[in-house]
Amino acid sequence: MKTTTTTTLTLHFPLILFFFFLSISFPTPSFSQSDTYPILLNPRLGKAYIALQAFKHSITSDPNNFTGDWCGPHVCNYTAVYCTQALDDPDIYTVAGIDLNHANISGELPEDLGLLTDLALFHLNSNQFCGTLPESFADLKLLFELDFLDLRYNSFNGDVPKDVFNLKLDAFFINNNNFTFTLPDNIGNSPVSVLVAASNQLNGCLPRSLANMSKTLNEIVIQNSNLSSCIPPEYGELVNLTVFDVAFNSLVGPLPETFGKLKKLEQLDVAHNKLSGDIPESICELPRLKNFTFSYNYFCGESEKCSKIRRRDDRENCIPYRPDQRSEEECSAFLEKPVHCDAFSCMATSSPPPPPTPPPTAPPV
Ligand SMILES: *[C@@H]1O[C@H](CO)[C@@H](O)[C@H](O)[C@H]1NC(C)=O
Ligand SMILES: *[C@@H]1O[C@H](CO)[C@@H](O)[C@H](O)[C@H]1NC(C)=O
Ligand SMILES: *[C@@H]1O[C@H](CO)[C@@H](O)[C@H](O)[C@H]1NC(C)=O
Ligand SMILES: *[C@@H]1O[C@H](CO)[C@@H](O)[C@H](O)[C@H]1NC(C)=O
Ligand SMILES: *[C@@H]1O[C@H](CO)[C@@H](O)[C@H](O)[C@H]1NC(C)=O
Ligand SMILES: *[C@@H]1O[C@H](CO)[C@@H](O)[C@H](O)[C@H]1NC(C)=O
Ligand SMILES: *[C@@H]1O[C@H](CO)[C@@H](O)[C@H](O)[C@H]1NC(C)=O
Ligand SMILES: *[C@@H]1O[C@H](CO)[C@@H](O)[C@H](O)[C@H]1NC(C)=O
């Protein structure tokens, strides 16, 4: 299909609103377009039928009977399945959304889901899906309409296919699963405005290439993900960022001075890492910064200007003139070990494998 960016946007916008209202009125699963007009079957609905039947058969438990009526070829009548006119052919209907949020379903995602080529919204948040993501998710020729991919709070494991970051998603939520992967170098290709990957095993690196998301990225939350590299200074290019949250990892090195360029930043949370050095004054001067949490690190100084930030948490660092800091012994034991940011593969120019040397382990707390 060929549409210009403008038509895609104008066509998508009402669609997004449509689903927004649908999800507000949730749960009223009786809604379906065919209540008001008959939908004629067509080859795309035929493919959707194959995909949805495969999906149904890979479900092992559906306590609220969401898929109980997933029978027969009229997929637009199925609970939680939404059809609209195809973007490239208004004469036919196609499956544009699946919303199974909070359905408490257990099962896996079959490869055949890749047949849902017009899907714009796929919500599976808060279920008990497990297994790995189908490779077909990442196939660019498929799923090219997908805007929102919400897989939060499941038990998915394994890799997130690298090509997912090439999809034209607007939002990507995978937090609170058991995914194990390293943020790939092509992450900079992703046009998402919101990326929430917290509480998975991301083992290691924050890639420099993330800086290439500067045109679109507004919020990034990667808490509690076993990250252990330095924070790339290139992130100062993410000028549209309002939220940067990498708390509860093992990040080392300084908080880059370049963060002073993030003029839209409102929330900055780097707490519970192993960061050191001084808090750059330029960060405390950011005009919109309202909440700056850097407790439980090894920072050794902060400017007087930092006290003007409405909410600031600087406890348990090594700042001699501030209350509630770590002991001198703890600080000197940690700070005497040098940090080599270059030791992390993501800080070099080449691609993943996990860093050759593990980061220094924290002294007991
Ligand atoms: C399903 O949809 C078709 C076509 O829109 C319609 O004719 C049919 O009555 C519907 N079936 C049920 C059980 O709602
Ligand atoms: C599930 O839904 C189907 C179709 O609506 C119905 O026939 C079936 O009895 C339901 N099962 C349970 C356990 O509620
Ligand atoms: C979801 O399932 C779990 C156990 O399978 C159960 O404890 C919980 O109450 C269920 N929640 C809902 C909303 O059905
Ligand atoms: C992740 O896996 C571990 C062990 O395999 C399990 O104990 C834990 O509950 C899983 N977490 C999630 C969110 O599924
Ligand atoms: C955390 O990441 C490191 C690599 O940086 C890896 O060796 C380690 O196994 C990871 N920890 C867990 C709990 O997965
Ligand atoms: C951003 O992308 C350009 C071109 O695609 C590439 O040359 C550059 O190295 C990337 N920047 C980073 C920080 O990866
Ligand atoms: C930041 O976002 C605005 C729209 O909110 C956009 O016009 C602008 O181009 C973005 N900034 C960059 C550097 O892309
Ligand atoms: C400030 O940030 C901390 C850490 O992210 C968070 O726990 C707290 O709720 C935030 N406070 C406000 C008022 O946003």
Image: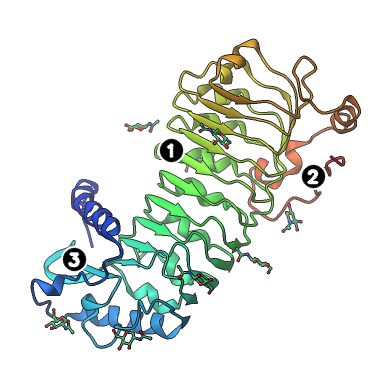
Horizontally, is 187 left or right of 202 in the view? left
Q: Earlier in the sequence, mark 1 or mark 3?
A: 3
Q: Which residue is mark 3?
A: 84
Considering the numbered disc 2 on the image, is that residue within a helix, a strand or a loop?
loop
Q: Residue at x 19, y 51 (%)?
A: 14
Residue 143's x, y, as percent? Answer: 35, 65
Q: Which mark is residue 218?
A: 1
Crowdedness of circle 3 by 10 Å Cα count: few (<14), some, many (20+)?
A: some
For the residue with label 2, is its CB less than 8 Å from the closest atom of ligand 5? yes
Q: Residue furthest bottom?
A: 72
Q: Is residue 56 above or below residue 151?
A: below
Mark 1–mark 3 distance (CA, rounded to whole Å): 29 Å
Q: Which is more toward the observer, 305 or 192? A: 305
Mark 2–mark 3 distance (CA, rounded to whole Å): 51 Å
Q: Which is more toward the observer, 239 or 363? A: 363
Which amino acid type is shown beneath numbered disc 2?
Pro
Residue 71's x, y, as percent? Answer: 28, 87
Which amino acid type is shown beneath numbered disc 3?
Thr
Q: Quadrant of the C terminus?
A: top right
For the residue with label 3, is its CB less than 8 Å from the closest atom of ligand 1? no
Q: Which residue is mark 2?
A: 359
Residue 144 makes an appearance in the image: no
Mark 2–mark 1 distance (CA, rounded to whole Å): 29 Å
